[in-house]
Image (cartoon, rainbow, N blue to C red):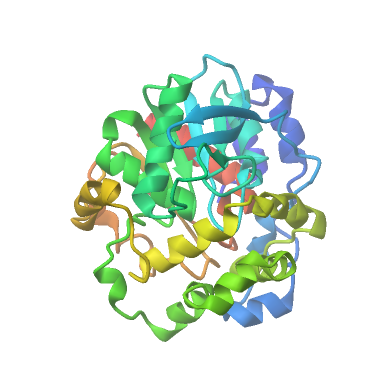
Amino acid sequence: MIDRRTFGRALGLGAGSAVAVTLAGAPGASGTPRTAHASAMTGHRPGTAAAAAARPRVGSAFPPLKKVRAGLLDIGYAEVGPAHGPPVICLHGWPYDIHSFAEVAPLLAAEGHRVIVPYLRGHGTTRFASSRTFRNGQQSAIALDIIALMDALGLEKAVLAGFDWGARTADIIAALWPERCKALVSVGGYLVINLQTNLQPLAPATEHAWWYQYYFATERGRTAMEDRAKRHDLTRLVWDTVSPTWDFDDATFERTAAAFENPDYAAIVIHNYRWRLSLAEGEPRYEPHEKRLAARPVIAVPTVTLDAEYDPFTVPGDGTAYRDRFTGPYDHRTLKGIGHNLPQEAPAAFARAVIDTNRL
């Protein structure tokens, strides 16, 4: 993993004081893991490299958010950097929000990129334009939201970079609409869902990490997501367990948890996870795209894949399990001591990956 001193030399701190200010908040590699309890629950043993993950500073804030009508949605998004710079779209996952990129974005902006960080459907300030639209969380619907956002902003193509739901969304666009994707940064590699394959059981330890997916398949799980207090505690538990070495504070979580107050949040999350298990139907309008995705299409755009050592969803094999899905210029990196929320835990390394796609 790139430390902040090496990263600063590579970028050139003269490019903008924002880089120096942001990286100054990142501790060195001698910090401590967040809690022993969290690591025990996930079965991982935190290492001393874990504190290379930046301790989030709630003061790292975006400028006032923007909103644009894009397809079925009014999408809320943050934007930093020069308006005519090469665009980068950063895509968050669950249970996270745009603040996963609060420290990544200024690093990229200081290098001249126009950085756009949208709230996915059901999150934050993003709203459905019509109350009659089905609250659909299936993978191709979310990907088409981002295509619509690019159209609304007049972006022919952009670098797409994400994790969790965001990585899957970026993968889908790179696979089905490569003309819209200049390059790809995907945490976890190839995350496109094949519903038929998804019916097969995984190893018990992996299934254990997905406990909330099965919880959401029940009405108890739906009720929990609709209950503000239970939703708050459930999502906080996920943060603690899937990022066992990340030394975040309560204020950092609460800043993101505000995005879960979106009136469509529970419906989108529940449908997403039930659809994955073939327990909820998708919509016919997306079926042609899902059929193409079921064939596991390759991705030919320049790509950097990132794996996190302490992410319970990282596939074993240092990227070999999905290497054949990437046929273009390619690099793979494993970040030691880092958990699931990779861009917020290791913002310098994530930003470095985005910048390095230009050199593939």
* 355 on left or right of 95: left
- 27 or 327: nearer the viewer: 327
The quarter holding residue 184 reads top left
The answer to whether residue 326 shows anywhere in this view is no
Q: How far across and down, in percent of the image, does residue 301 sit?
A: 29, 37
- 275 or 39: nearer the viewer: 275
The quarter holding residue 5 reads top right
The quarter holding residue 182 reads top left
The structure residue drawn at horizontal position 60% and vertical position 34%, both measured from the top left corner, is: 77
View extreme (front): residue: 132
Is residue 326 placed above or below 219 in the rendered structure? above
* 281 on left or right of 5: left
* 229 on left or right of 242: right
Q: How far across and down, in percent of the image, does residue 130 sit?
A: 50, 39
The structure residue drawn at horizontal position 41% and vertical position 25%, both measured from the top left corner, is: 151
Q: How far across and down, in percent of the image, does residue 232 sit?
A: 71, 65
The answer to whether residue 211 shows anywhere in this view is yes
- 354 or 252: nearer the viewer: 252
* 155 on left or right of 322: right
Is residue 327 placed above or below 111 in the rendered structure? below
View extreme (bottom): residue: 204
Is residue 10 placed above or below 199 in the rendered structure? above
Quarter of the picture containing the C terminus is top left
Q: How far across and down, in percent of the image, does residue 207 sit?
A: 44, 79
The structure residue drawn at horizontal position 26% and vertical position 70%, both measured from the top left corner, is: 197
Is residue 37 placed above or below 20 in the rendered structure? below
Q: How many marks?
A: 0
